[in-house]
Image (cartoon, helix red, strand yellow):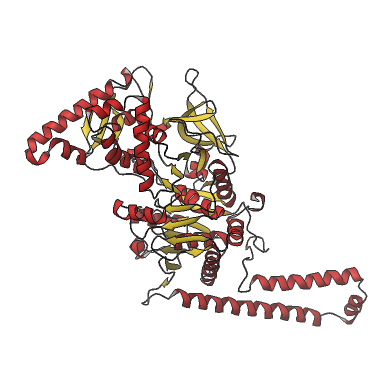
Amino acid sequence: MSDTVLTLKDLLARSVEVFAERTALGFVDGQPMTYAQFGEQVHDLQTVLRGHGIKPEDKVAIISENMPNWAITYFAVTTMGAVVVPILQEFHPSAVQHILRHSEAKMVVASRRYMDKVEGENFPNLETIMVMDDFSIANEEGAPTPYREALDTARERIEQFSEAARDRLENLGGAARDKLSDSAKERMNKFSETAREKVEKLSDTYKDTVDWFSASARRFIDWKTGKPFELTEDNVAAILYTSGTTGHSKGVVLTHRNLVQNTISGIHTIPVFETDRFLSVLPMAHTYECTVGLIVPIYSGSAVFYLQKPPTPKTLLPAMQKVRPTVMNVVPLIIEKIYKNRIKKKLTGSGVARGLMKIGLTRRKLSQVAGKKLIEAFGGDLRCLCIGGAPLSPEVELFLLDAKVPYAKGYGMTEASPLLAGINPDSQRIRAIGPALPGVELMIADPDPETGEGEVLAKGPNIMREYYKAPNDTRDTFTEDGWLRTGDLGVFKDGYLYLKGRLKNVIIGPSGENIYPEEVESIINANDYVQESLVYETGGQLMARIHLNYEALDEAFDVKKLIESEVRDKVLKLLEDIRKEVNSKVSTFARLHRVVEQMDPFEKTPTQKIKRFLYLEK
């Protein structure tokens, strides 16, 4: 069946037909739509897009919180051959404006919440602003044009264009016949039956040409070739602007082949079924949620539900009880916070409990009790907690494994659509991030003779075409023989890939040793009083910035009874104790010289990775 699904248009058409009456999308507290209704809404929105001049290869930007209309817009744009440009809503207005200019977006679909990021600026290519919430058309004259009015107007325009095109073709045909000489007409009458069939086929071609411009047409004339536009797997589907830890945003060009093949490979690794229910909480503009949380369930006939408010514990917990998701995509920070703030306290709250947790069998039994409660908090039907976007704490992973919480890990990057490797809940190994997905090749470049470690390289049908309008960046990201440089350091053991850290983050020790800051950070973060940390080198010495768990500190220190200087002394002593504890667990060359308090939370990417470049010089 997957052989016939080559593009997102094929994917959607198949799902609308096969799963027509099943639930496709909806708000948690709203009336969901079926796949048949989803297909109709995609088709109607395409009509409006065409009515506003959108044609294949035009860029349509999206900036909005998660909602069903986001999914409708994504598929309406991509399945008509245009290019979607999802923009992360956390981007600063100046970054949004840069993306709109750099991508040459002809239309932007923005929710009311983020409309201010696209208004009031001059964008050379931008012609139309649509309101995501209700698909109304924003205009400068006053009230926006309602969606139904825009749809009716678009249909009228297309019908008028169709009639004009039909009349022109008929007039051209009649004029051509009138200009024939008598001898030419006589020769035509002597044509063989074969020739007559060819003429009839030519007439059919005229009819087909007229149909291309009809209200129901989904094809366009390619201005480059003069031939009808046919969507293929090699057409560009999306340009996603990264929000990495270096501060340099690049437009990743992904084709229909990239996204469809990654979807199918992902399902082969972690099966998804039409009976599954997804609760979408990560930003859809990030390729992890877009592929795994939208395209995968649409391909599988699953239902996807969205929150109408930001995903705080107050809104998330009742939503999980109502939807009872079977699959949820999360980044490690979410599950790590739940573990540290809710579960670990109960498991290690007393000296006796800490002692019991050191006994393997007892630890597993206590963890399973906590794991059962965790699954119940997710609604009780959870069969796969998909974790990706950043490394998972080994301590938290051990708990998930002991607790029998069904979790899957995925590894990838935007440039890979995004999945490169993954492990399903039945095959987990601590710290491993899985074998390569079907169809994906992974290798270690120039492995260290002793450790086998080196940069992870990748090849496959899911690898991006290029960085948009950035040939130098594209050239630097690929090897001469076409392998994608991931920038991650890793090693293979028994066919499983283990990551050590980012190549650009590696710190060289005093005698040339490789120090992986992520490994030291995982030890620091295991402390109950630590929320997160950042390890870096300055002046030849290893430093750590630590953002403390102030809620736990308030409880432990009873700060209400202390004056400010006493609180400060306790914090300084705690930081020194953490430094000593960490140094007792790492190699001599990786010991911390100094730790400092990071008062404010670290700034992060949408997948909750710390933006290291902001802190290295502090």
- Residue 380 seen from this side: yes
Left or right: residue 470 compared with residue 256: left
Residue 295 in the image, given as x and y percentages of width and height: 52, 53
Report the quarter where the C terminus lies: top left
Q: Position of residue 597 (x, y in %)?
A: 21, 35
Q: Name above or below for residue 199 compared with residue 364.
A: below
Q: Nearer the viewer, residue 25 or 404?
A: 404
Tell me the quarter of the picture where residue 31 sits. Answer: bottom left
Residue 537, quarter of picture:
top left
Image height check: is 441 above or below 107? above
* Count of numbered badges drawn on the protein: 0
Give percent across and percent down for residue 310. Answer: 33, 56
State the residue in front, 319 or 202.
319
Instruction: Tell me if residue 246 can be seen.
Output: no
Task: Name the residue rendered at 27%, 36% in the picture.
Answer: 346
Q: Where residue 182 sits: x, y (%)?
A: 89, 82
12 with respect to 135 (left or right):
right
* Drawn side of residue 9 relative to residue 123, left or right: right
- Above or below: residue 361 compared with residue 604: above
Horizontally, residue 289 falls left or right of residue 2, namely: left
Q: Is residue 159 above or below residue 388?
A: below
The residue nearer to you, when weighing 473 against 111, is 111
